Structures are given as C-alpha cells and as structure tokens.
Image (cartoon, rainbow, N blue to C red):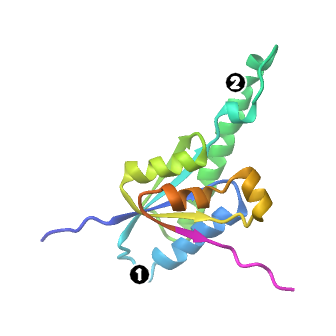
Amino acid sequence: MATTKKSVMLVGIDNSERSFYALEWILDHFFTPLAPNSPFSLVIVHAKPSVSSYIGFSGPGVADVLPSVEADLGKIAAKVIEKAKEICISKSVNDVNLVVGDGDPRNVLCEAVEKHHASTLVVGSHGYGAIKRAVLGSVSDYCAHHAHCSVMIVKKPKNKH
C-alpha cells in the first residue's frame, strides 16, 4: 500500500501572546484529536535574534557583554520552544519538529519554508498600525510577499467591551 507524504505546515513563533494564539488556532483547526489524519506534518520555527541586532554599537567593553547577551537570547529561545512544546502536548499533538533558527525572523522563516519544503507558512499578527509597521517592519507582510508557499496570517480577535 502506497503512503502519501504529508504537506508541511510551518508555524513561525516568537515570544508574543499573538504568535502562541496562532499556534493554538492552527492546532485546534488542523491537528485536532478528532481528526487524527491531518494532511500536514507540523514544523514550528522560532528565530533567535543575533547579538548584533541587540548590540548595534561598538566600543570598549562591548566584547565583554557579548557572551552574556548570547546566553540570554539562548535562554529566551529555549523558553519559547518549551512553551510551544507544552501547547502541542496539551492539544495531544506529539509529532512536531521544533526548530530554532538564528537571525532576522523574516529571513529565518522564508529559509525554513525552503528547507522543509513547506506548503503553508503560518504566522501571527502583532496588529501594528501603519506607523509602527513602517518603522519596525512586518514579518507577516514580508513573508506574504517573499515565502514560496501559501501564507496564513492568524489574527487574535480584539476583546469587545
């Protein structure tokens, strides 16, 4: 009997509530225990920023803090991946590939799409306005234009008073 290879769904996460919401939404809609035969295999990617993105200057003493900053970034990445793993386990999803990439999230996610041959990239939306998006850049917007796959942007509903 021939087995068909599952399409890869890649979910990009950071340390934000909105990215974890997107992960939970995907798990609830595509990887539910009620539908154990999901057509997707799941890859979760976190982009660990480079030290140079945090320390954009040079001078005396900078080299002394680099190892400490690198260690802190590694600890944050480990916590993000651990939280993603806990969310998956709580949703009874155990077959997941958790990956940490180094660098700008836009590049890390687009490169991961290519590496894992993903058919779908899922990212959360931070909900930035036009000015913040212009200054900070939008990972979801960049990926929508540059990733070589379908891109799903999951928005967390706003609370209504």
Q: Is residue 154 magenta?
A: yes
Q: How far apart are labels 2 and 1 at the CA level? A: 45 Å
Camera-nearest label, 2 or 1 = 2
At 48% from the left and 51% from the top, the residue drawn is: 110
- Residue shown at 54%/45% (left/top)? 100
Q: Is residue 75 left or right of residue 3?
A: right
- Mark linked to residue 107: none
Q: Residues within 10 Å of mark 2 (few under 14, many from 20)?
A: few
Q: Which residues are magenta?
A: 152-161
Q: Secondary structure at mark 2?
A: helix
Q: Quadrant of residue 71?
A: top right
Residue type at mark 2: give it.
Answer: Pro
Considering every residue shown, the one lying at the far bottom of the view is: 161
Q: Secondary structure at mark 1?
A: loop
Along the line of sight, which residue is nearer the eye, 113 or 91?
A: 113
Whether residue 124 is situated above or below residue 116 in the rendered picture: below
In the image, residue 29 above or below residue 140: below
Residue 67, numbered label: 2
Disc 1 marks a residue whose amino acid type is Ala
Image position of 87 with respect to 114: above or below:
below
Task: State left or right for residue 63 relative to residue 149.
Answer: right
Above-or-below relation of 37 to 56:
below
Give the overall secondary structure of the magenta segment: loop
Give the percent coordinates (x, y) of residue 131.
Answer: 79, 59
Given the current orientation, which residue lies at the most extreme left position?
1
Q: Which residue is mark 1?
A: 35
Residue 1 occupies quadrant: bottom left
